[in-house]
Image: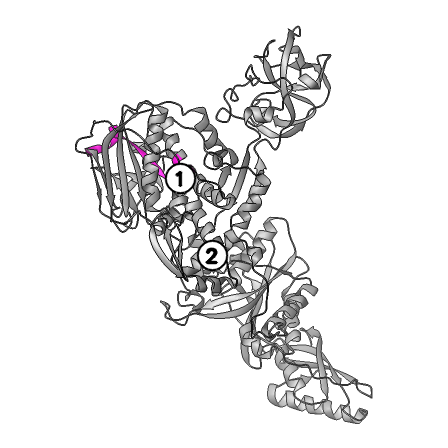
Amino acid sequence: MLAPLSWLKEYVDIDVTPQELQDRLFSCGFEVEELYQVGKDIDGVVVGYVESCEPIPDTHLHVCQVNAGSHGTFQVCCGADNVTAGKKFPVALVGAQVIETAKDHVTVLGTAKITKGKLRGYESNGMLCSGTELGLNEDLYPGAGYNGLLVLPDDAEIGADIKPIVGLDDWIFDISVTANRPDCQCIYGIAREVAAVLEKPLKAPALDYHETDVKNDGFDVTVEAEDLCPRYIGHYVYDVTMGTAPQWMRRRLALVGHNSISNIVDITNYVMTELGQPMHAFDGNFLRGNRIIVRRAANGEKITTLDEKEFELTEKNLVICDAEGPVALAGVMGGLNSEIREDTTSVTFEAAKFARDNIRKTSRGLGQISDASAAFSKGVNEYTVEMAMKRALHLVEELGCGKVSSTHVDRNTGNSLLPTEMKASIRRINGVLGIEVPNDDIVRILTNLDMKPVISGDELTIQVPAYREDMESYPDIAEELIRMYGYDHVKSTFLQNAQVTAGGRNPRQKAELKLKRRLCEAGVYEGMHYSFFGPSDLDLLRLPDDAPERHAIRLINPITVDLSLMRTTLAPQMIRAIARNQKKGNYDGRVFELASRFIPKDLPLTEYPEEKSTLCIGIWGEKESFFTLKGLCEVAAEMLNVKFTYEPAEKTYLHPYRTAKILVNGEEAGYLGQIAYPVQNDVDMRDPGYIAEIDMELLSKYYGAVRKFRPLPQFPVQKRDLALVMDKTVSCAEVTEAIESSSKLITDVRLFDVYEGLPIPPTKRSMAFTVTFTPDGEELTAETVDGQVDRILRKLSHTMGIELRS
């Protein structure tokens, strides 16, 4: 919310500095996100009087003697076509800062420092400035839009700072307004708070106007959707003279980011900014049937808005219609068929309250965002609807751009605009705050907030203004009191029966943090993605229609279709992340994400879904392979003190021969593999990528497991190398498990060679393992180890048909 200091002073006599006002606003609950001077980029520019101006031969330049008062008289070269002797212009002294423009003298490039220089051999000690070079335009100051020097008033004091003269000394407050205070999304709303916090009287905006006896016979308003439009006011204005709004209005609109369009349109924008009530003006000549109908749109009905975009509507959208069809998208934007034109002679002003949720859904659903839709989405009260209409009609009369007729139609559901009485216990209010606010301060604060407080014993009675729809019960009164009384009055104390606890992380948090650190130590960066994905992500994985991953929760009101489902797998976003990195020149990398998958127990939802913590790892690059990914999975296994085993697996989105499922004590805990080539092509992946997904929820039962200490053996270990011949269908993991289970003395089994070819039969292959035997209490002899080896070979031969290679 942008609020110029000069506009706030229209309603409150502010006698503190902008910085002090910023602090006071913050103290009462309104954070000023930024406070800046309008001319913050301008420095060292003063009023200069051109005493003489001589052309430089064969150029468009002039050499001028400029009197800058106490700053001296000096020579300046200038190429503007309107430079002349006897006039006053802004002059930037040497060392001054101004806005830098391109050669067109319009496009802003940044800021520039003024230095001494020479032009065509003539010394120049400064620069005469245009309006653009001071950051001004025609709306901010008359004449600033001219592509030449800015002409200053004859009574401007020579040598005086330029900022107060052209309004560059004004301050802008960028105020953060909380969602429960939509009444403060306007200048007058902030002015109310300023008046209260400074304990100054609040001046009311002028709302008076004079109606003529002229009527618009037959004009009528019908509200069919009262639940979406509880109040609608229309007023007819005739003898409209289109033109430009006065300078003061255009300047105020420019300070808050509005471009001036015409006097009638500027009035609607001015009222919206000043009072927070969006308004619209219909060209009376194009209001067919002289009627306005507020209704739900028909399915398939179309409208073209002022920005020339056509929308197809549904019955969920609210429209303003004339006798033949829509002329405005209610609360969002007017229709092109009823816009104000240069030849408009009559206008029907609209001020209404629309249901905030309906406007928000319409605006989002159609992708049509406007200042009006933003205001209605936050909330507009009926009190302001009537006030805004009066203000607009007053401005029509003040600007002399039309005559106010007596045709006034007010359709409402009977809601009162009078203050609402509220009673509360002072003891309960103080109980919420934890302190006792003196009764005198209670009366003072609530009086300043226009709530007319009366205290009788312990009972407080207030009159809640109609614009304060956030006030519902005594905790709201407590909030109003403490933000004005001062949070510094609240002292930190222990609760009466409080105890100090040790605190700390739970086992899950400790385990997950430890896992993240281990992965980072292994060179893997943590990544984060949205908890949503879209149907296209599931299609990318080539999942069948009955795949469990497609059993996903659909959002009721998604931002986009690509974020319309709660994710049931982390794979697609990791695949897309790998592709994005490769496209941006990151040709090798490692990324992990530890996040939740959302598994519904039933659809539509009847209870909360199951949130499964899941680890997803993605790697890519020349040095990465299936086995480096397997090594990273082993990092997770080692951290949890569990053993992963692997079996061949198939996934629709992974390479058919480079995919494995991960098992823990016989339970499937995840998978790993290379991304399938068709999937890589779909996302324009340059080099192969590999992903793994591990169900940490399944492994959570191992969190916090304590690793048992085993002392180093007193005697040396013994190792034996075994070259084994087996069928190609037998996996390394099966052989390793069989060897390890053969003897309790075996502490490690490592594969070091795989061979296929003569003299090995074609259906077989050779795998060589190093088996480590660790003594348990007594030294291992060669005979003992040989006996253990024989035991291993007998088991392998009997159970798996594996023989020792000769």
The front one of 72 and 55 is 72
Q: Is residue 490 visible?
A: yes
Q: Secondary structure at mark 2?
A: helix
Q: Position of residue 130 (x, y in %)?
A: 58, 20
Find disc 2 in the rendering and name its residue.
439
The front one of 587 and 76 is 76
Query: Residue farthest to the left?
Result: 218
Magenta-colored span: 271-289
Q: Is residue 697 above or below residue 799?
A: above
Q: Is residue 522 visible?
A: no
Would residue 656 be found to the left or right of residue 57 on screen?
A: left
- Whichever of callouts 2 and 1 sits on the residue coming sooner in the sequence is 1
**What amino acid does circle 1 point to?**
Leu
Q: Is residue 531 above or below residue 729?
A: above
- Alpha carbon distance from label 2 to label 1: 32 Å
Is 159 part of what is drawn in magenta? no
**What amino acid does circle 2 point to?**
Asn
Would residue 6 be found to the left or right of residue 396 on screen?
A: right
Tell me the quarter of the picture where residue 525 sits.
bottom right
The residue sitting at 34% across, 23% down in the picture is: 400
The residue sitting at 55% across, 50% down in the picture is: 27
